[in-house]
Amino acid sequence: MMFYRLRGKLIHQAPGVVVVECGGVGYKCLTTSSTLSRLSQASGEVVVYTHLSVREDALDLFGFATPQELDTFRLLISVSGVGPKSALAVLSNLTPEQFALCVVSGDAKSLTKAQGIGPKAAQRIILELKDKISNEDLAGAVGQAAPAADFSSGNLGEAISALVVLGYTQSEAASAVGKLDSSLPVQELIRLALKNLSQNS
């Protein structure tokens, strides 16, 4: 990659765009709403992690507040049919950790909330990236959660299924249940997960 990161003064921001001045040059970066929010709260110099997209008719620079967001963006655009604009839309709706949980738990519904991501694209993202998501990617979303494989079996799986029936998305349910002790009875897992979900709503 031609650029890895920029460090300088934030001189302009607009929906989907930040401009960082480095050495007297202003670099326009297309970005997510979460990066916009984070950078707007920073004082002094800002750091933006970047990806340069080279096409026949354009050079586009994409910027992110964290390396994790950059890595997730690159994962998304590696999926056939998912372009940079759709990847930005996904990351404006979900943190990298939440996205990882959606992929591992097969939560296509949450992915389709992003503009430009339909049911087929969501399923393709899950199919192509499921094996590329590590437990470290999930850490921020589920805390000390059990390994992803446990989400579909045993008490955890039953509790998650029950929460989905109650109207929660697969990733919301997995996130709430994943923070709990997997040895608890199913009914207790559901009760505690509902308590956590109601506090977060």
Image (cartoon, rainbow, N blue to C red):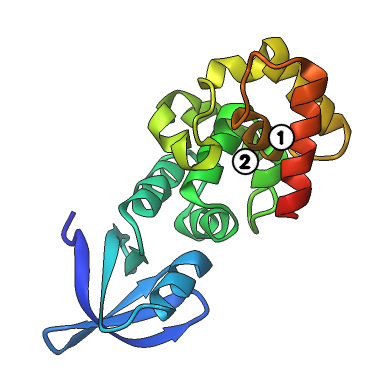
Kindly give the residue lying farthest to the left in the view shown.
Answer: 23
Amino acid under label 2? Ala
Q: Quadrant of the N terminus?
A: bottom left
* Residue drawn at (74%, 25%) of the image: 189
Query: Please, what secondary structure does the residue beneath circle 1 have?
Result: helix
The amino acid type found where label 1 is placed reads Ala
Q: Where is residue 166 in the image (x, y as percent from the top left)?
A: 88, 35
Q: Which residue is drawn at 51% across and 60% down?
A: 85
Which percent across, then down, holds residue 79?
A: 47, 39
Q: From the viewer's perspective, is the residue at label 1 or at label 2 nearer? A: 1
> Which residue is denoted by mark 1 in the rendering?
173
Residue 116 appears in which quarter of the rendering? bottom right
Inspect this view and state whether residue 66 appears. yes
Question: Relative to residue 19, is residue 35 drawn left or right?
Answer: right
Asked if labels 2 and 1 touch by Cβ distance under 8 angstroms, the answer is no
Residue 81 visible in the picture: no
As displayed, is residue 109 above or below residue 64? Answer: above
The numbered mark at residue 121 is 2
Q: Earlier in the sequence, mark 1 or mark 2?
A: 2
Q: Distance between the residues labelled 1 and 2?
A: 22 Å
* Residue 11 sits above or below residue 40 on the image: below
